[in-house]
């Protein structure tokens, strides 16, 4: 039995494939390489001793999906494939709805046809919008503020409706908080194109001299030091959350949304200080205006993941900082 991993050459997907290999699980990756590179397959093999089967295809290509399901004995799908830049989704909404929502629809249709009814979906804390309460539990109101968030919510709804229509479906929607860090080998990690949107890759690029200084977006939020607070989670902990979620298919049918976070919130300024202390590198920064659309604080109530699938994050902030820098310093230009 094999797991189909869409988007498996990407940042979170590649770390998850490594953890699946460690358990002896066979994997087929399907990815269109729109935001990843083939060399990731070599790196996965270097770490895990096993090369995943790879199919270069788009999740919107129904014929390609049908042939994957007919040629391989797929028992479940982990669905990472998607576009993920919030700003880009505002500028190019139709591209996002097509790739993310229509793509997920095609995938679910192909799964339905092949009678593969187990799926883990990469959702996001973005579905809570400006959160109703803190820490954020899975019953908080769902609302989104941009097309990317709307895509995630629509895909969740589509999956929920499918579960209502057919009790054989089991869907685990993992709502990630802020994934950071890299595999401890320094062989795989986050490889953003152009100027990073996210905090952690920006910090590591300042550390390596690629960028002059970090802009801290706002120091006047209602938080202890005025900068934004987030729940940063080590990408390997996140990958292990997917492995645990596979175990849910035998005991939890229907639609199950589950937060993957640590439950701890750290501010931008705390992140900078922590990086400086752990790696002994100064990060020059300036205080800039707030970034439009940002919220003050976002951190998880992670208890449901513990109760339902015996998962909790084990890697702390120091490990995230160390591994993020190890990856960046070994690969100053990413996978280039
Ligand atoms: P990533 O861009 O590194 O990986 C996504 C992969 O999907 C890439 O390899 C890309 O080539 C592939 N892909 C995109 N569209 C495709 C399509 N139409 N057909 C086939 N392959 C396609 O991103 P990531 O950080 O690994 O994120 C994985 C998933 O997790 C995404 O769905 C993302 O929205 C979600 N997520 C990410 C974060 C985060 O901060 N990284 C937070 C919450 C949720
Ligand atoms: N920040 C800076 N400077 C930067 C980049 C970010 O100060 O150069 C700040 C932001 O203002 C925010 C914090 O660092 O306070 C984290 O920002 P990120 O962009 O790293 O992460 P976000 O929480 O804004 O967004 C992430 C994902 C989204 C997802 C969201 C909610 O990138 O895809 O979490 O899950 F929707």
Image: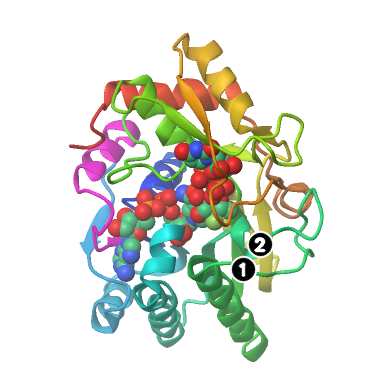
Residue depicted at x 34% and y 26%: 328
Q: Which of pointers 1 and 2 lies earlier in the amino acid sequence? A: 2
Quarter occupied by residue 2? bottom left
**Mark 1 vs 2: CB contact within 8 A:** yes
Q: Give the residue at x 45% y 19%.
A: 284
Q: Quadrant of residue 33?
A: bottom left
Rendered residue at 49%/66% (across/down): 148
- The magenta-colored residue range is 30-49
| 333 with respect to 108 (left or right) | left
On the image, the x and y values in percent for residue 166 come to 62, 88
- Taking the image as shown, residue 281 lies to the left or right of residue 290, namely left
The percent position of residue 227, horizontal first and vertical second, equals 65, 35
Q: Is residue 33 magenta?
A: yes
Q: Mark 2: few, some, or many residues within 10 Å (few <14, many ≥20)?
A: many
288 relative to 310, above or below:
above
- What residue is shown with label 1? 144
- For mark 2, what is the residue? 129
């Amino acid at each position: 039995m094999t797991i189909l991993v869409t988007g498996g050459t990407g940042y979170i997907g590649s770390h998850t494939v490594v953890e699946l290999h460690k358990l002896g699980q066979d994997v087929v990756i399907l990815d269109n390489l729109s935001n990843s590179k083939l060399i990731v397959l070599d790196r996965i093999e270097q770490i895990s001793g096993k090369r995943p089967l790879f199919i270069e295809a788009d999740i919107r290509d129904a014929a390609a999906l049908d042939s994957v399901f007919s040629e391989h004995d797929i028992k479940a799908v982990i669905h990472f494939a998607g576009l993920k830049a919030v700003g880009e989704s505002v500028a190019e909404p139709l591209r996002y709805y097509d790739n993310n929502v229509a793509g997920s629809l095609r995938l679910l249709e192909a799964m339905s046809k092949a009678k593969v009814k187990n799926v883990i979906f990469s959702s996001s804390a973005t579905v809570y919008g400006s959160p109703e309460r803190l820490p954020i539990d899975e019953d908080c109101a769902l609302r989104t503020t941009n097309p990317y968030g709307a895509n995630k919510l629509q895909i969740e709804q589509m999956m929920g409706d499918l579960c209502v229509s057919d009790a054989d479906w089991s869907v685990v929607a993992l709502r990630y908080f802020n994934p950071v860090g890299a595999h401890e080998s320094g062989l795989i990690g986050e490889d953003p194109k152009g100027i990073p949107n996210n905090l952690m890759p920006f910090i590591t690029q300042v550390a390596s001299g690629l960028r002059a200084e970090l802009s801290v977006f706002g120091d006047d939020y209602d938080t202890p030091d005025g900068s934004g607070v987030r729940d940063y989670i080590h990408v390997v902990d996140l990958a292990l959350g997917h492995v645990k979620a596979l175990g849910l298919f035998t005991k939890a049918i229907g639609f199950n949304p589950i937060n993957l976070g640590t439950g701890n919130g750290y501010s931008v300024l705390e992140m900078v200080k922590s990086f400086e202390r752990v790696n002994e590198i100064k990060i020059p920064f300036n205080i800039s205006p707030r970034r439009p659309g940002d919220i003050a604080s976002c951190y998880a109530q992670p208890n449901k993941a513990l109760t339902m699938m015996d998962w909790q994050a084990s890697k702390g902030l120091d490990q995230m900082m160390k591994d993020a820098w190890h990856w960046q310093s070994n690969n100053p230009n990413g996978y280039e």
